[in-house]
Amino acid sequence: MLTYVNGEFYPADNAKISVRDRGFRLGDGAFETILIHAGMPYQLALHVERFKKSLKHLGIKSDTKKIPELVKKIIAKNKILDGFVRIAVTRGESGFGYSAKNVGSPTIVIETEKSTVKKNKPAKLWMSSYVKHPLPGKIIGNITSVLARIEAEESCFTDSLLLDAKGKICETSSANIFWFTGNKLYTPKSGMLEGTMRSAVIRLSPFPIMRGDFILADLKKADAVFITNVAWKILPVVELKPLGLKWKESKKTKILAQLLEEDINGMG
Amino acid sequence: MLTYVNGEFYPADNAKISVRDRGFRLGDGAFETILIHAGMPYQLALHVERFKKSLKHLGIKSDTKKIPELVKKIIAKNKILDGFVRIAVTRGESGFGYSAKNVGSPTIVIETEKSTVKKNKPAKLWMSSYVKHPLPGKIIGNITSVLARIEAEESCFTDSLLLDAKGKICETSSANIFWFTGNKLYTPKSGMLEGTMRSAVIRLSPFPIMRGDFILADLKKADAVFITNVAWKILPVVELKPLGLKWKESKKTKILAQLLEEDINGMG
């Protein structure tokens, strides 16, 4: 397995960056994780667009033009059929402190990972004790998601549901959330990362999409709930603790999952 | 110059970590920056105590017992008289995603930097457009401070003042804030990092300390303002833009700066 670091491919175990890199020092960078199916990156253009936005918000001037080519190159070199590509760009190397006055050129790292999981179990969600705060994109320095995920895993839950400071439903630590109430499909319109699988679901759904600001009382009315990300695709949620909410897997979720699989298969 | 990485000292330019390190991947770690004066670390025990708290909040089980010894060792090896030691501990290496189920052992990096600035100019502060959210310690993944500092530097200001979502004064991106109104010394009591220079000022001040929840209207009444961190020690603030607030350097601030210098000198 090879990893790309600043213009060169290295054996993954030898792919290293300086301890002075601001990604390592301060979480000062952005990343993307892209699904690979049958050797092809799914929704690559959408990832690159979002990545550009994250870097713009951070004020990191990195050339993103070569990314699509590099992504395809690393998939071919590593012979990945099913798995993921991860791209990270940081502001570069600097001294101690937050000052960005003397920073080197941006660091770029591109890695691949093979998919090991055939089928994910339905998700059990934990109500996070952390509060979701807005982030300017898919940022490395996002300790809330790290701690919310760990909080869930410590209690053997799949993931944690995050609300913002006003109690608005945002996302889970690692995924976007959707739910059905009747025939309509609900999902938060703000406060969450604009996930690429979320975009795919919105694009493919035959059910009317209701994007809005929702609270737990809205979720309590749901008939079925699912979460989405590039690793889990569409994952039904069967429980939300400690609120005592339980849901069954629904036919409508299965229809969406089927449409998504067809879209992913059709891509190649 | 040598840098310590996981048990070994390397020439600083060769001190590297894997791209899989969760510090680099997710800002998943904590750090400390300690002042060195006359070859001695100032308030080392206070830094180690805070570092332990940060790591505890993150749930990172790293042995901190050897840190004081390692700090003294690296100062001696690098012959640092005046400068800084930076310690970073991350959760270790893992695959893509937030899951912490399969993480290696924690990574520890200890570096030094020589002090290059003889005397800092008084600070001009910018009113940040970012909102300060609480963090569980001195965390690597703190993009708000990064962006707030950059925002200030882009307009040739020293640093940015951060308020929380309710308008409460917290800190600047890189320092704690104090101000005099009359003979009393004011500083936020929550929402900020508990800076070690802030602790020193509180410990040394002959002026009564008023810790509380303050808003900009309180700061407007100030006769003199200063900020504190290990690099700037006590730095007078002369301006806060775009609010049009200006302050002169005060005798009381100079008295405190003198007391702090004596404390730092006395340490050795």
Image: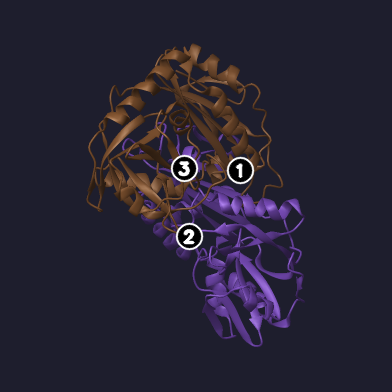
Chain colours: A purple, B brown
Residue at image coords 69%, 82%:
A252
Which residue corresponds to mark 3?
B211
From this view, report whether residue B95 is shown above or below residue A44: above
Label 2 residue SS? loop
Which residue corresponds to mark 1?
A1
Badge 2 or badge 1: first in the primary sequence? 1
Q: What chain letter is assigned to the residue under label 2? A: A
In which quadrant of the rendered image does the N terminus of chain A lie?
A: top right
Residue density around tag 2, few if under 14, some if 14–19, many if 20 or more, within 10 Å = some
Residue A80, image x and y in percent?
61, 53
Residue A18, image x and y in percent?
48, 32
**In the image shown, does A121 or B266 lie closer to the viewer?**
B266
Which residue corresponds to mark 2?
A134
From this view, report whether residue B37 is shown above or below residue A209: above
Residue density around tag 1, few if under 14, some if 14–19, many if 20 or more, within 10 Å = some
> Is A39 displayed left or right of B268 in the figure?
right
Residue A26, image x and y in percent?
47, 41
